[in-house]
Image: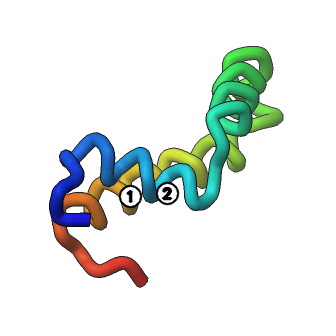
Amino acid sequence: MNNLSYNEKVSMFIRQKYTINDEIALINNYNLDKEKYKQEYEEYQEYRAQCKEWAKGGEND
């Protein structure tokens, strides 16, 4: 994994939980109805932030 770029690492971690189609659907659903999809979208954003920390070299717990 050391030969991967930061962006590749972030994507790799995100793909462990979300497919591209999952992400697109989640973002589009949130844009359509922010109140209805707020919790799901916030969980996704929190996971993205954690993936960025992992990619920087933080522990993957």
Are the residues tagged 2 and 1 within 8 Å (C-beta)?
yes
Q: Residue at x 77, y 25 (%)?
A: 29
Secondary structure at numbered mark 1: helix
| Residue at the (23%, 52%) spot, across then down | 4
Q: Quadrant of the C terminus?
A: bottom left
Q: Residues within 10 Å of mark 2 (few under 14, many from 20)?
A: some
Relative image position of residue 20 (x, y in whole percent): 63, 34
Q: Give the label on residue 47, or none.
A: 2
* Left or right: 55, with 22 as reference point: left
Rendered location of residue 60, percent (x, y): 37, 78
Dot 2 falls on a residue whose secondary structure is helix
From this view, report whether residue 39 is shown above or below residue 57. Answer: above
- Using the image, tell me which numbered label, if any, was put on residue 32: none
Q: Residue at x 26, y 65 (%)?
A: 1
Q: Which residue is at a point 76% across and 36% down the rendered structure image?
A: 37
Residue extending farthest front: 3
- Is 39 placed left or right of 57 in the picture? right
Image spot of residue 3 (x, y percent): 17, 57
As shown in the figure, which amino acid type bears the numbered disc 2? Tyr
- Label 2 or label 1, whichever lies nearer to me, is 1
Total labels: the figure holds 2
- Coloring scheme of the render? rainbow
- Residue under pointer 1: 51
Callout 1, which amino acid?
A: Cys
Q: Is residue 11 above or below residue 23?
A: below
- Alpha carbon of mark 2 to alpha carbon of mark 1: how far? 6 Å
Q: Which of the two residues, 33 or 12, is positioned nearer the viewer here? A: 12
Q: Is residue 42 left or right of residue 50?
A: right
